[in-house]
Each structure stands twice: as C-alpha cells, then as structure tokens.
Amino acid sequence: MLSPDFLRTKFAAALPYNAYVATGSADQQASWRRFHEKVRLAEPQRAVIKAFQRRLNVLVSSGMWCGDCVQQVPMLDHIAVENPEFVQLRLVDRDQHADLAEQVRICGGLRVPTVIFLNEDFDFIGLYGDQTLSRFRAKAARSLGASCPLPGADVPPDEIAATLQDWVDQFERAHLLVRLSAKLRERHGD
C-alpha cells in the first residue's frame, strides 16, 4: 500500500529535475537536454497550469537510460516550471528505488516513466505512466504496421504536442481532484 509516510519519504529522497538529469552519463544528459529544448507549452496550457491553487507533489519513477523517459519527463519539467509554487516535481531512479517501482507496476511490469500524483499531505491521488494515449497511438501506428521505427528516431512535432497535451490534462485532472477535495477545501477555507 502506498502510504503517505512511504510516499513522503520517497519524495524527500527524490531529486529535482536538473539534479536528476545530472546523474546521467554525458550522452544521456545531452539527449535529455535536446528533447527538453523541443518542448513548448502553448499559451492555453500555460494558463491552465498557472491557475493551479493547490499543491501537487509529483513523484516520478524514471530511468536515465529510458527512451520513453527522455521523450516525456522533460515535458513534466516544463509543466512544473510554469507554477513552481503549486507543482513540486521530483524524480527517482526506478532501479535504485525498487521498493517503490514494485508497488506501481503497470501491466505487470516495472514501467517507466511512472508518475505518481500526491496531494499536499502526500496522499495518493493517482498514477499515470509508461506512455500517454497519444504516444501509444503513435507507437501503435509505427510498430503494428509493416514497418518499425529506428531506435533514436526523431519524434514528430505533432506527437510531441499531443503527448504534452496529454500530460497537461493529467496534471489538470490531479489538480482538480485536490482542488475539489472536501478535506482540503475545509482546511483552506474555500
């Protein structure tokens, strides 16, 4: 069970985005930086994120070596940077925190990235991960047909935009859950 105490401990041991990326090899860091530079939030997405009024603690189980992490976790950083007061993003290496990874298996596997949304008390809100719906659709179109993508192939801009929107939607969903929480509304008097 993902208890608030366990999650709080994991969050405290986790690293902010830039510190996490710095743990990778020079090649890994360069890949993460290159993809980070491709991500651009649209103004409506920025407005949604800037309107958050409740703290979200976002804990990510990731791997510097993981291609899906390289192509999604930088998006999470862009979201967090838009509202640092209410979006706290932290990352852990899946293999170094196997006790967490084991508890958040997706489809029976130790998938990454796995994003765990928590409220201000580190209560579990929800889990989302491996890939967003847009990434699954794009991957299925490439992999289930007559051809397969080359490893390290560029991600088309429309896929980046759609995946980013998927992530913004998940953050908004988590925020609305905490914003409408009776416990937190009573605590904050709103």
Image (tube, grey):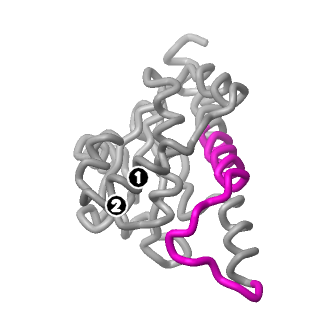
Amino acid type indicated by mark 2: Met
Answer with left or right where residue 102 lies relative to residue 114.
left
Q: Residue at x 41, y 38 (%)?
A: 89
* Image coords of residue 4 (percent x, y): 36, 44
Q: Amino acid at mark 1?
A: Trp
Nearer-the-camera pick, 15 or 34: 34
Q: Is residue 100 left or right of residue 23?
A: right
Give the image location of residue 5, x and y in percent: 30, 45
Please identify the quadrant where the N terminus is shown: bottom left
Tag shown at residue 32: 1
Residue 61 location, quadrant:
bottom left
* Relative vertical location of residue 78 with respect to residue 157 in this rendering, above or below: above
Q: Which mark is residue 64?
A: 2
Q: Residues within 10 Å of mark 1 (few under 14, many from 20)?
A: many
What x and y, as percent, mark residue 155? 61, 60
Most foreground residue, 1 or 7: 7
In the visual, does 126 lie left or right of 33? right
Q: Position of residue 110 (x, y in %)?
A: 42, 72
Q: SS at mark 1?
A: helix
Tell whether label 2 touches label 1 (CB within 8 Å).
Answer: yes
185 is higher (above) or lower (below) than 70: above
User: Is 97 one of the magenta-colored residues?
Assistant: no
Relative to residue 78, is residue 125 depicted above or below?
below
Give the quadrant of the C terminus.
top right
- Density class for disc 2 (Cα within 10 Å; few <14, some 14-19, many ≥20) is many
In front of the other: 148 or 76: 148
Residue 108 or 84: which is nearer the viewer?
84
Tell me how many marks there are. 2
- What residue is shown at x 62% (from left), y 77% (from top)? 149
Relative to 5, residue 79 above or below: above
Residue in view at x 46 percent, y 69 percent: 111
- Give the residues in magenta: 145-171
